[in-house]
Structures are given as C-alpha cells and as structure tokens.
Image: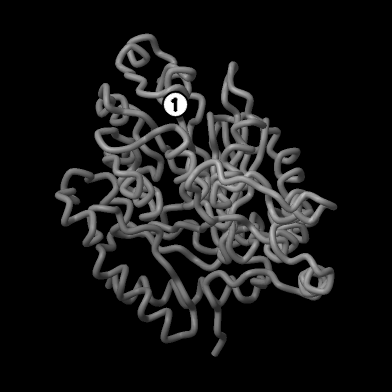
C-alpha cells in the first residue's frame, strides 16, 4: 500500500548544501541571505519594498499596529479563512468583521464587504484561498470611492496620510500567482505571503510583506520602520552592529521579535532559483492530471485555477463533491487515510471554531462559506508527487466517494 502524505516540503541536496554553507559561515541569524531573499522577492513581485519576517502572521500584525488599528476599530475579512487572518485583529484589540464568500466561490463577496463598511472600518483583508487571487482591482476601486472615503475617520498620522481604508491582502497561499498579467505582490497597499513548511515556496517558517503604498508614503521608509519594530525597536540589527566601532544602538520603541534568520532565508533562495522553472509547472501538471482523471463524474466540482484576470499558483487542489455532506466528507477522508492517502480540508469557517463561536459569530450567518466547506476535500499537491501517486490518490478517492454516496 502506498503512503501519500499531504504536503511535505521539497528538501533535497541543494537545500541541505545551502543550509550547511550558512551554518558554517559563522552568520546564522538575520543577515545577507535574508536581505538577498527580500531583494529577489521584490523583483519577482514588482513591489516597491519587501520585508521578510518569521511568519505571515507576525508580519501582518505589525502592519495593523503601524497603521494604528486598535480598540474601537474594525477590520473586514472573510469568514472562510484560516484563523490567523482574524487572530491578528484580536491581538491589536480591534474587532474582526466577518463577511461571507460569494456563492459557489472561495473568494470574499465584495458586495457583502461594501455593506459592512462603517466609520470604524480601518482595514479590509481579502484572502486568496488555494493560490487563486482575489479581484484586487475591485477592492482598490471600492476604497477609493468618494462615498466610502467620506466614511473613513482617521485617528493618526498614517491614517490621515492615506485618507482611506487600507487594503492588506492575505496572499499567504498565492506567491507566484498571476493577476492581470502580472505576478501577485504589487496590487494592493500591502500584501502578505506565507513561507510555512506546506506552502509552495518554503523557508520552513517565514513570511514576507510587499509594500505598494501610494504617495506621499515612502515604501522603503515604511519597510525600515517595520524592520525596527520586528527587532525589539532596536535601531540597528545584529549585522550592522558587527561593523567596526558600531556596537552602540538605541531602542526607539517597545518592539517585537519576529525577524527571519539566514538559515531560513537560504531555503527560500534555493526555492526561488527553481520556482517558476520547476515548482509551479509541476504543481500545475499535478492539478491538471487530477482534473483529467476525476473529470466527468457526476459528483465532481473542479477547482477554479483560471479566470479572465487571474491564474492560480496551484497551492491547493480544493475538490468539492456534489451530494456529499460534512459527515460524508469526513468519512471519505477516513477511508482514504486507511489506504495511505492523506487528505485535508481548507478551511473550517471561523464561526465553527470555539474562540470565534464564543464571541458570538454564527455559522448560519455565512451560508456560502458553510456550503463551500461542507463538501470540500484538499488533495495532495507537492513537487515530489509522481503521476503514479496521483493515479493512486484518484483511485482511492473514487472508491471512497462512491461508497459513501451510495
């Protein structure tokens, strides 16, 4: 019996050699490799500035704090997302305003977003599920509408300078995706990527922010400010302090500790070298093979990988199954696990989770999110998954689904 894990990282001798080189270099924390990765990502995404930190979560929270989001403020985000998107809003003392996704879609419903905007709204966080970009242009047009701008009530210098709601995209899944012919990363005010172990491009743990704020903001200066915030508010990082006679530093704020190390960054650099030439083509081929084998069955609902404006980076194969309810979906996953195939679900809508349920969010208020969730199964997609592995997953899955449906 085959054993098919869900999403192991691609770690080969190139990765081992690169990490070993850093380990033996004498410099293992934030340093030249981290800055090189930032430069590579910035060029790849076409953004104005890039900052790499130890996770998407901490990076995005720093942006909320920089923008002055706090108690009494509201941040709009989809009910269909991983908890991190909402958790960071809780961390800063603001209120997550959950909205439903569009019907038969994993993308946040922009009409529902519009209806939830109030004078307390400071940030909108659309989420790219599975690597498929949201319609960024629609969100940027929304926050620039005069009626929406008039609602905005700035409470500090940064908010006054922007003069409108900030759009910070949770692009954790969508590094390498395409929107309007360009790589994702420069379409909204701030965009955040995750480089967690299961992501298309990994640094083991890590994430990046790309900055695209309009004038009069200096994006490089914003990046530098957040870089200080990410290292205890220290005016110099460790590498700068090693320069002759440069030991002295200052603490300019009570900052945090969420820098990315060179050990992690070099893993990302190896992946950058082969991302477009190897990683993305293989992931796309796997998804296309799933569709070709499973397509045509009456229960098959193919994931969306391409739209007029967009192409996914094929992070997830989020299959939905007609006629299957939540209990049946879970039974399919159990049966496949017994045959060595690991499947997953992306995601449980936030109102199903105890913390958010206890805050009063009701699953019944988000019917489209619940409909998407109830029969969704994520299939394995990773570089080293062979065509024979894909066929085994499909054979196992078909038997399980048709057994449960019957």
Q: Residue visible at 52% across and 72% down?
A: 6
Q: Residue furthest bottom?
A: 1
Is 40 or 381 nearer to us in this picture? 40
* Residue at 28%, 59% in the rendered image: 323
Question: Which residue ends up furthest to the top in the rendered image?
Answer: 146
Which element carries disc 1, helix, strand or loop?
Answer: helix
| Quarter of image, res 345 | bottom left
| Image position of 156 (left or right of 308) | left
Residue at 22% over, 45% down? 367
Q: Can you say which quadrant of the picture contains the C terminus? A: bottom left
Of residues 105 and 165, the one drawn nearer to the viewer in this rendering: 165
| Apparent side of residue 94 relative to residue 67 in the rendered image (left or right) | left
Q: Is residue 27 above or below residue 38?
A: below
Tell me where residue 44 sits by quadrant: top right
Query: Residue 114, image x and y in percent?
Result: 31, 25
**Between 357 and 229, the one nearer to me in the picture:** 229
Image position of 82 (left or right of 23): left
Q: Is residue 273 visible?
A: yes
- Image coordinates of residue 273 in percent, x first then y, are 80, 55
Q: Residue 150 at x, y = what percent?
A: 33, 11
Residue 371 position within the rendered picture, expressed as x and y whole percent measured from the top left: 27, 51
Name the residue tied to disc 1: 139
Q: Is residue 170 above or below residue 27?
A: above
From this view, report whether residue 38 is shown above or below residue 152. Answer: below
**Badge 1 local density, few (<14 within 10 Å), some, or many (20+)?**
many
Task: Determine if residue 179 is in view.
Answer: no
Which colour style is shown?
one colour
Q: Quadrant of residue 163?
A: top left
Q: How many marks?
A: 1
Residue positioned 38% across, 48% down in the render: 88
Up-down: is 363 above or below 191?
below
Which of the image's four quarters has the N terminus? Answer: bottom right
């Amino acid at each position: 019996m085959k054993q098919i894990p869900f999403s192991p990282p691609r770690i080969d001798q190139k990765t081992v050699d690169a990490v070993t080189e850093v380990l033996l270099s004498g410099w293992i924390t934030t340093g030249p490799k981290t800055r090189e990765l930032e430069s590579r990502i910035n060029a790849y995404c076409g953004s104005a500035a890039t900052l790499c930190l130890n996770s998407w979560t901490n990076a995005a929270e720093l942006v909320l704090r920089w923008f002055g989001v706090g108690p009494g403020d509201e941040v709009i985000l989809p009910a269909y997302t991983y908890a991190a998107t909402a958790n960071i809003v809780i961390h800063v003392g603001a209120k997550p305003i959950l909205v439903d996704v569009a019907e038969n879609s994993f993308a946040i419903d922009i009409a529902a977003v519009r209806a939830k905007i109030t004078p307390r709204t400071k940030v909108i966080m659309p989420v790219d599920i599975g690597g498929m970009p949201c319609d960024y242009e629609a969100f940027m047009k929304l926050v620039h509408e005069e009626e929406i701008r008039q609602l905005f009530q700035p409470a500090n210098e940064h908010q006054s300078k922007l003069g409108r709601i900030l759009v910070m995209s949770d692009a954790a899944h969508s590094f390498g995706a395409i929107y309007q012919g360009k790589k994702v990363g420069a379409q909204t005010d701030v965009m955040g990527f995750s480089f967690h172990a299961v992501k298309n491009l990994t640094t083991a743990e890590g994430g990046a922010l790309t900055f695209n704020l309009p004038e009069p903001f200096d994006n490089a200066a914003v990046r530098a400010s957040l870089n200080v915030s990410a290292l205890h508010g220290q005016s110099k990082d460790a590498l700068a302090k090693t320069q002759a006679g440069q030991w002295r530093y200052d603490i300019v704020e009570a900052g945090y500790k969420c820098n990315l190390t060179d050990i992690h960054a070099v893993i990302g650099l190896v992946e950058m070298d082969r991302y477009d030439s190897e990683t993305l083509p293989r992931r796309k081929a796997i998804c296309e093979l799933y569709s070709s084998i499973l397509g045509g069955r009456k229960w098959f609902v193919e994931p969306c990988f391409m739209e007029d404006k967009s192409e996914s980076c094929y992070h997830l194969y989020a299959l939905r199954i007609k006629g299957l309810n939540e209990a049946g979906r879970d039974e399919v996953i159990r049966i496949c696990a017994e045959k060595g195939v690991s499947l997953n679900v992306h995601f449980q809508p936030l109102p199903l989770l105890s913390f958010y349920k206890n805050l009063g969010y009701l699953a019944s208020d988000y019917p489209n999110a619940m409909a998407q969730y109830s029969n969704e199964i994520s299939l394995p997609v990773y570089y080293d998954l062979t065509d024979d592995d894909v066929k085994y997953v499909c054979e196992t899955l078909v038997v399980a689904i048709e057994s449960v449906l019957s």
